[in-house]
Image (cartoon, rainbow, N blue to C red):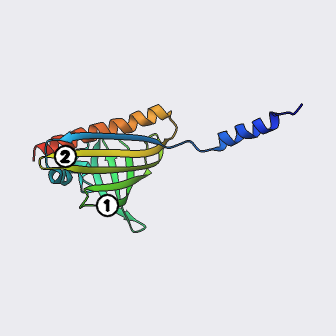
Amino acid sequence: MKSYALPLAAFGFALAATPAFALEVEKSMEVAASPDKVWQVVGDFCAIGDWHPAVESCEDGEADGKERRTLTLKGGGTIVEELVSRDDAAHTYTYRIVESPLPVANYESTISVSGEGDNATLSWSGTFDAANATDEEAENAIGGIYDAGIQAIAEKAKGM
């Protein structure tokens, strides 16, 4: 009779050592404004200080030749984010968090605007790992940030 205890234990260890899959949150909204107007609101990397209700201010900066922004949050705290890529013609940019009090690690996010005429689709998506929180807590935190931001961008673009 063979013993399967050792192979099963090794299999269990391999599963425990495998990194978890990244979490993903994706939010989008139809906006009754042209894609160009929506991009005017959101396209500047530091414009988040003008439209996101949780951000008190945004300060442009640079580190190691890469564009960064430091967000001062209402109620305290700061987030440092780094621009990964940008395509103004396609109305999209991607960034990553460098330092943050948020319950996430390995966070990378993309904001994009698409559409035609006076109808735009605004999308904000991100991948990350939960840090010092459950997956659900991390997803809810990021989802809430996206919901509040998308709503504020839409309102601002409609008023232009």
Residue at position x 29%, y 52% in the image: 58
- Label 2: element kind: strand
Place residue 25 in its image quadrant.
Answer: top left
- Residue 104 rendering spot, x and y as whole percentages: 46, 42
- Residue 18 rendering spot, x and y as whole percentages: 63, 44
Place residue 2 in its image quadrant.
Answer: top right
- Residue 6 rendering spot, x and y as whole percentages: 81, 37
- Label 1: element kind: strand
Q: Give the labeled residue for mark 2.
A: 120
Disc with the residue nearer the chain's start (2 vs 1): 1
Q: Evaluate if marks 2 and 1 touch, with contact meaning CB atoms under 8 Å apart.
A: no
Residue at position x 41%, y 53% in the image: 96
Q: Is residue 121 above or below residue 84?
A: above
Say which of marks 2 and 1 sits in front: 2
Residue at position x 29%, y 55% in the image: 92
Which amino acid type is marked by label 2?
A: Ala
Residue 156 versus residue 3: which sits nearer the camera? 3
Which amino acid type is marked by label 1?
A: Arg
Q: Is residue 11 visible?
A: yes
C-alpha gap between disc 2 and disc 1: 19 Å
Q: Residues within 10 Å of mark 2 (few under 14, many from 20)?
A: many
Q: Residue furthest right?
A: 1
Q: Give the labeled residue for mark 1.
A: 86
Q: Residue furthest bottom?
A: 65
In the image, taking residue 28 as reference, residue 96 lies left or right, namely right
Place residue 141 in its image quadrant.
Answer: top left
